[in-house]
Each structure stands twice: as C-alpha cells, then as structure tokens.
Image (spheres, grey):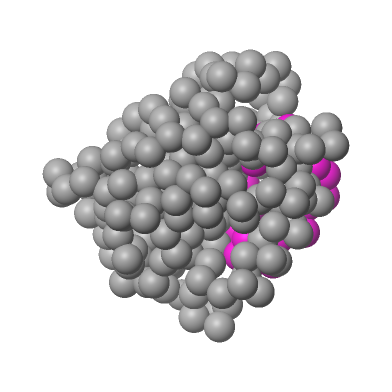
Amino acid sequence: MMEDKKQHWETVYATKKADEVSWTEEVPQTSLDFIRELDLPKSARIIDIGGGDSRLVDYLLQKGYKNLTVLDISEKSIERAKNRLGSAAGEVRWIVTDILEFRPEYSFDLWHDRAAFHFLTTQDQVDNYLNIAGNAVDQFLVVGTFAENGPEKCSGLEVHRYSEEDLTSAFNLQFKKRKCILTQHQTPFKTIQNFTFCSFTRKDS
C-alpha cells in the first residue's frame, strides 16, 4: 500500500510541472501569515509535512529561519525543490518518507501541513498521524485541509474534507485551537479550492 502511494506521487512529479498540478502556490500567503502570527525565533525548528516542491521553504529561508525540515513521500518532488533553491538547499534538512512511517529524531517547535493530512481517509491513518505529531511537536501546529465544500479528490485520490469543528476535534486530545479560517486557493488552472486552515498550541507546552 505504501509503495503504491509512493509510486503515485513519484509519477505525478515525474510527469507534471508545477503549473500542471492544482496545489501549486506562487506565494503560500496563508501559511506565511499563520507562521508570522506565532512570532517564532529564527532558530525555531520548523517542519513542513508533505512540503515537497512547495515554495514555503523558499520564503522561510528568505525571512531568516535557520532550522528548516521538509518531508515528502516523493523523492522527485524534493529533487525539484532542491534544484529550484540551488545552493540554499544545503541549509534545509530533507526527508523522503511517508508521514505515517516518520520517526522523528528530535522534536519541532512548529509542524506545518497543507498537503498530507486530508489524504488520510481511515481512522487508523488519522490516529497514527496524530500519535506521530503528538510526540514530535513541542509548541505549535498549523494544518490546512480541504474544507467541507472543497474537492472530493486530489490528484485522483480520495480525500477527507474538514470543517473548523472537525479539524479542531481531530487534534483536541493534545492541541488547543488558536485560530481557524476558511480560505480559497486559486489553482494554476484558475479554479478555486476551499480550505480550512487552523493553528494549534500544544496543551502541555
């Protein structure tokens, strides 16, 4: 199952350019706004889950963040990001793995995910994710998922859509909601996708 999923994403990134996939953002403004509001030091340990070819890491580097990690199941997506960043790619820690197989070597001040969580469609997968994040996050978590009126599929795969209440409830055991918004992402094809974005604070932090 994991190999099938990995092969799916390797094929996507091998055959489609950034402007040929719906999730591409020239400027990941919503994520940047949420991160700015957390007022983290530039030394904060930040991980982008499913970050792959996302430009979030580019902007965080430009803003002076020094301790960045990007995780993605697709090696090809990370190769594309490295090529785009050039020499700056050496300032980032890159991890190729399925999020459900991730075993962090240390904890993070901020866990950001705009890409992976809504692809978890069974309760076992969600519980596994929450366990991994719960053990890996010291302070904050920012998650963006497809909203209730968002797409039912992405890249041909089924997704789980979340309202603010659903997303808050999913993380409620270990995290307290700070803020949630509904936002619209304009794809490279000029269509609109509705997202639910929430930030959380670890309850025992």
Please say whether residue 85 is one of the residues in the magenta stretch.
no
Q: Nearer the viewer, residue 52 or 144?
A: 144
Question: Does 27 appear above or below 71?
Answer: above
Q: Nearer the viewer, residue 145 or 46?
A: 145
Please say whether residue 110 is one of the residues in the magenta stretch.
yes
Magenta part of the chain = 94-111
For the point 37% across and 72% down, which residue is it?
A: 157
Can you give x and y, in whole percent of width and height, for residue 75 in the image? 52, 60
For the point 70% across and 17% down, which residue is it?
A: 41
Question: Does 63 appear above or below 27?
Answer: above
Q: Residue furthest left?
A: 190
For the point 61% across and 52% down, which residue is it?
A: 169
Can you give x and y, in whole percent of width and height, for residue 5 in the image? 49, 74
Answer with the quarter of the image where residue 127 lies: bottom right
Question: Does 33 appear above or below 140?
Answer: above
Question: Does 4 appear above or below 201?
Answer: below
